[in-house]
Amino acid sequence: MGQGTVQVGGHEIWPPGASIPETLLGVRSDVAVTPAGLLGALAKWTAPLSGVVHFENITPGSETSGSLITTGTTWVKFSTAGACGGKLLLENDCNTGEFATWRMRARAANTTASGDGNNSVGTTTCLDASASANANDYGNLKAVNACAQPNALNQTTDATNIVTALYGRIDATGTSLGRRWVGWLDTHAETKAAGGDYMLRISHNGKIAIDGAISIYNGGRLPQLFNFEDVAGFLSTSGSGTFTKTHKLAVKIAGDATQYYLQLGTIA
């Protein structure tokens, strides 16, 4: 397989005008890809297509709108309901290891200056997703839609099995003078939504009652439940006044059958 080529049906696809024995319309990873060129090349073979598109020989340019695959500054419009820009239906047929439909890695290779902690200095991001509006009265916006779907299939053999729609993890063995958060929720909104504006919402739209909203596994390694960085708003340092109990929050402690409660009320 030639340098930077695409192989289809056992044949190499080269850019238009390439000086090779076969006259092919196609693409190389170091030459601009055109839809007409790619379709013309694929039309030459009726056998099942196989091969890999290689980008390892590319020297990225200085543009910031995408150096490998891009639409530049053009927003390509889709007008069909349920459409998408790309779709891969891949099935894991192996019962060991870990399969991923799309595996991406981003690596920081240089020493950076001290930042302000707000994602502005020397940040390396593996996935940058946003859903923006371009008209008033826009529909729902979701930057990331994650869904795990066991559907009606049963899992009856492995009691340790886990199904999660979103999983976050930090792998680190070195030290750090900075901070680490497995999850970070942040808002830069300068207006308030009239129907409700919160940092986090947990909802249950299923048909059965579950065990609770939050489960915390301590393992003896979580010395504190909360760290309030700022004493303001909902956190008060005043303990004066008469406390009148009005409500209670149910709390479950693993391995203990007793039902416990956190008392809520008013202070007068």
Image (cartoon, helix red, strand yellow):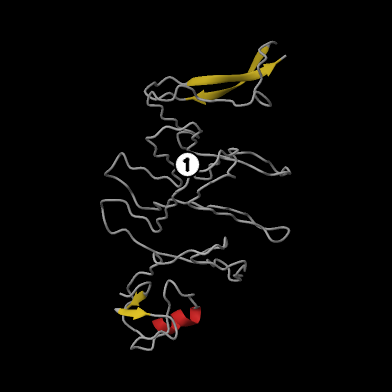
Please tell me which residue is depicted at 68% across the width and 41% down the height of the picture: 196
Is residue 236 left or right of 150 when viewed as pictured? right
Name the quarter where the N terminus is drawn. Answer: bottom left
Q: Give x and y (percent) for residue 70.
A: 53, 67
- Of residue 200 and residue 205, the one placed in the foreground of this image is 200
Please tell me which residue is depicted at 44% across the width and 25% down the height of the picture: 222
Please tell me which residue is depicted at 37% across the width and 55% down the height of the picture: 100
- Of residue 78 and residue 261, the one placed in the foreground of this image is 78
Q: In the rendered view, tell whether residue 177 sits above or below residue 240.
A: below
Q: Give x and y (percent) for residue 207.
A: 49, 44
Amino acid found under the numbered disc labelled 1: Ile
Name the quarter where the C terminus is drawn. Answer: top right
Q: In the rendered view, tell whether residue 115 sits above or below residue 72.
A: above
Residue to which mark 1 is pinned = 208
Is residue 26 left or right of 192 when viewed as pictured? left
Q: In the rendered view, tell whether residue 79 sits above or below residue 166.
A: below
Q: Quadrant of residue 103?
A: bottom left
Q: Give x and y (percent) for residue 26.
A: 42, 80
Is residue 64 left or right of 169 when viewed as pictured? right
